[in-house]
Amino acid sequence: MKTALAHWLFGWLPADARERTLRRLLVVWGVALAIGLILWGIGARSHPLDIALVYSYAISTAIWFCSDPLRVALHRWLRTEPPHYWAPTLRMAGFMFVSTTIGYAVGTAIGDEYAGRSTWDMIGQSPLRLLGFWVSGMVISGFFVLGFQQRARAEDLRRQATEARLKLLETQLEPHMLFNTLANLRVLIQTDPPRAVAMLDRLNDYLRATLRGSRTDPASGAHTLADECARLNDYLELMAVRMGPRLSFGFELPEELRAHPVPPLLLQPLVENAIRHGLEPRIEGGRIDVRARREGGMLRLDIADTGVGMDPTDEAPLHDGGFGLAQVRERVASLPGGAGRVEVDSRPGAGTTVRLTLPLHPSITA
């Protein structure tokens, strides 16, 4: 709902700035209500409440519009970068001074139109009082700017901590998968050398793709769902060399979701679990399906297998000694916004489905 509203109001802004801009507008409106009530009370209720509120909301909203959405829209000229579009430069300081002054003038004109009077008459009657109003507006705007800057800095620190945490999890997972594969390769070398050679070729392809992925900055959003599924396909092809006809798999990836960014190696622990705890214990093996779909403002990812299943109250096998489901849940919880969730649906003899639900990226909802 909030994402759709942000897109409707601020579709002309970069996608990564829309929700933040909406949140700042809601903060400004909340403070505007308080300011309007305070001014009405300080004035001994000498003028109607509606006029005090109109002035407060008109001035606050006009200053916000001139100094916030326009600041983002002019980010190339201001030489600022996403995601916050702030910069401690003279150009930015000059822009904020001019934009807040224009916003104050526009908001005052709107209030005057509603009240049926002219604030600018005070230039001849009481110029110091008019100057005081302008200065107070600038001071309040300055507090907003500082507050939003501090919040942006705090968000950056949280994001950096999250990225470091995810990177640590990735570095733990990579050798985990590699050691499992090498152990399987060692068995095949002794029992089936031709299949061992084929598996080694697949491993070489997989590691080459993994090396390319490791050079991608997770925060850039450059690792897409299509990339994740391509690497999963390499991994499943690798496992198919070992399991032969006992393993089959498929992918359902709608075209409009292929470019959706996801953390690298998000789904692989779930596929590993599906093979190890679902298909391998079953004599005839089974099938794994990886499905992606859009549900409202969310991205739904399903890893479904036709394996042996498990008691729905016992998820211990899926944690795989510290990885698997626990690792995926930790990574989903670390994603910005914290709106993702992980669910497990399993029954003994009926297979297991692990479902990830993540917020859709703004570039997809646009």
Image: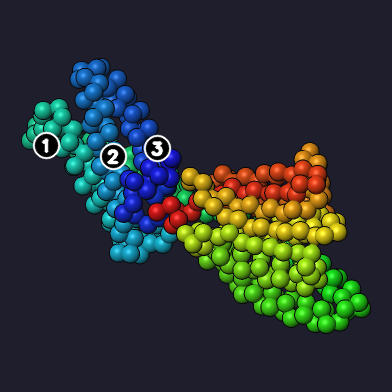
Q: What's the residue type where badge 3 is placed?
A: Val
Tag of residue 228: none
Q: Who is closer to the viewer here, 365 or 147?
A: 365
| Residue 276 appears in the figure | no
Q: Which residue is drawn at 76% across and 46% down?
A: 350
The residue that disc 2 covers is 61
Q: Residue at x 77, y 43 (%)?
A: 347
Question: SS of the residue at dot 2?
Answer: helix
How dense is the environment of label 3, judged by Cα within 10 Å: few (below 14), some, or many (20 and up)? few
In primary-sequence order, the first of circles 1 and 3 is 3
Instruction: Classify residue 336 as left or right of residue 308.
Output: left
In primary-sequence order, the first of circles 3 and 2 is 3
Q: Which residue is drawn at 58% across and 59% down?
A: 252
Q: What's the residue type where badge 1 is placed?
A: Trp
Instruction: Classify residue 176 as left or right of residue 51.
Output: right
Quadrant in the picture for residue 105: top left
* Label 1–label 3 contact, CB within 8 A: no
The residue that disc 3 covers is 27
Distance from the alpha carbon under mark 3 to that under mark 2: 11 Å
In primary-sequence order, the first of circles 1 and 2 is 2
Question: SS of the residue at dot 1?
Answer: helix
Q: Nearer the viewer, mark 1 or mark 3?
A: 3
Residue 123 spot, x, y in % from top left: 10, 37
Quarter of the rendering occupied by the N terminus: top left
Quarter of the rendering occupied by the C terminus: bottom left
Residue 49 spot, x, y in % from top left: 25, 21
| Residue 120 appears in the figure | yes
The residue that disc 1 covers is 120
Q: Say if 251 sits above or below 353 in the image.
A: below
Instruction: Classify residue 311 as left or right of residue 151.
Output: right
Q: What's the residue type where badge 2 is placed?
A: Thr
Question: SS of the residue at dot 3?
Answer: helix
